Amino acid sequence: MTDTTVSTARSRSASAGAGLSLQQQRQRAAFWFIAPMVTALFCVAAWPLMRTIYFSLTDTTLSNLYGGKFIGFDNYLSWRTLESGRTVYKGTLVDPAWWNAVWNTVRFSLVSVTIETTLGMIVALVLNAEFKGRGFVRAAILVPWAIPTIVSAKMWAWMLNDQFGIINDMLLKLGIISEKIAWTANIDTAMFAVLIVDIWKTTPFMALLCLAGLQMIPRDIYEAAKIDGVHPVKVFFKITLPLVRPALMVAVIFRILDALRIFDLVYVLTPNSKATKTMSVISRENLIDFDKFAYGSAQSTLLFAIIAVFVALYIWIGKVDLSGDGGK
C-alpha cells in the first residue's frame, strides 16, 4: 500500500514537471527568489516616491504633514490674472532658481562623467597591464573612492581655503597664480572646485568597472593582433573599445545616476553658492529650510522625472543591452 502511494506521488510529480520546460522551471524559481527583493524595494523606494508625488499635489507643510489640502498642480505651475490684465505665473516650472539648479546639475554631470570615464579607462588600461606591484596599485587606487564623501569634501575645503590652503600656497610658489583664490567662495571657480573633488574621488570607481570589463577580453585576441603587427592604437579602437563597450556603457549609467542626484559634496564644499546649487540641494532647502514641504516635494518629483528621462535617452541612444544575454 505504501509503495503504491509513493509511486503514485512520484508519477504525479513527474507528470507535473513534464508540463513545464526547463526554461519555465528556471523562470518560476527565479520569480520566487526575486519576489521578496521586489517587495522590499517597493516598501523602501516606490512607496516613498508615491508619497512624494502625493505631497507635491497638496499644500502640506512640515508643521502639518497630514493636514494638507489637495491643490492639484499648483506647485508645478499656476497662474493668476490681475485686474490690470497682467498674468502672473507661479510654480516650480517657472522658478528661475529651479532652472538654474537644473543647469548646474546637467553641466556638472556631463563634464564630470565625461572626464571620469576617460580617466577611468586610461587608469584601467594601465592596471590591466602586467607589472610588479600591480596588486598593491590596484588596492591603493581605490582609496579616494573609499573615503566618505563628507570627509573628502571637508578635506578638500581645507586644502582649497584661500587663507591657509595648501593648493593656493603651491600655485603661488610655482608662479601659476599671482594672488590667493577663494576657490569655493568665488562664483567663477566654485563649480571648478566641485568638479576637481568629484573627479578625484570617482575616477577610481570608473577605473574599477572598466578594469572588470577589460579582464573579460580573451588574451588570445591581443596575441593574434600582435603577431599580425597591428598598431597598439588601432588595437584599442578596433578590439579593446568595442569589446569593453557593454561594461563601459553600464558604468556610465551608474555615474549619470550618481551625478544627477549629487547632494552631499556640493552641500558641504560650497554651501549656499548659486553657482553650484543642484536640484537635490534646492529641493532640500525648500523641504527643510524654507518649510515649503509641498513645493520641495514637487521639485523632488521633477528631479526623479529628469533622471528617468536622462537614463532612458542614454539607453535608447546608446543602444545599451541590459538583458544580460549579449543581445542574443
Image: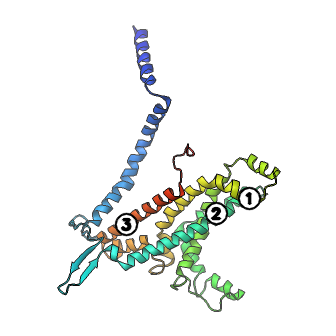
Q: Is residue 201 visible?
A: no
Q: Which residue is mark 2?
A: 120
Residue 307 sits in which quadrant?
A: bottom left
The image's mark for residue 302 is 3
Local SS, label 1: helix
Q: Residue at x 41, y 42 (%)?
A: 35
Q: Position of residue 64 (x, y in %)?
A: 24, 68
Query: Of label 1 and label 2, which has the lower sequence position?
Result: 2
- Nearest the camera: 252 or 175? 252
Label 2 crowding class (10 Å Cα cut-off): few <14, some 14-19, many 20+?
Answer: many
- Nearest the camera: 33 or 63? 33
Residue 172 sits in which quadrant?
A: bottom right
Q: Are marks 3 and 2 in contact (CB under 8 Å)?
A: no
Q: Position of residue 187 (x, y in %)?
A: 50, 85
Q: Residue at x 39, y 79 (%)?
A: 97
**Identity, as a three-letter code, of the amino acid under mark 2:** Gly
Q: Residue at x 56, y 74 (%)?
A: 195
Q: Residue at x 64, y 60 (%)?
A: 207
Q: Are marks 1 and 2 in contact (CB under 8 Å)?
A: no
- Nearest the camera: 15 or 270? 15
Query: Of label 3 and label 2, which has the lower sequence position?
Result: 2
Give the Cα separation between the discs numbered 1 and 2: 20 Å
Local SS, label 3: helix
Q: Position of residue 191 (x, y in %)?
A: 53, 78
Q: Which residue is mark 1?
A: 234
Give the Cα separation between the discs numbered 3 and 2: 31 Å
Disc 1 versus disc 2: nearer the observer: 1
**Identity, as a three-letter code, of the amino acid under mark 1:** Lys
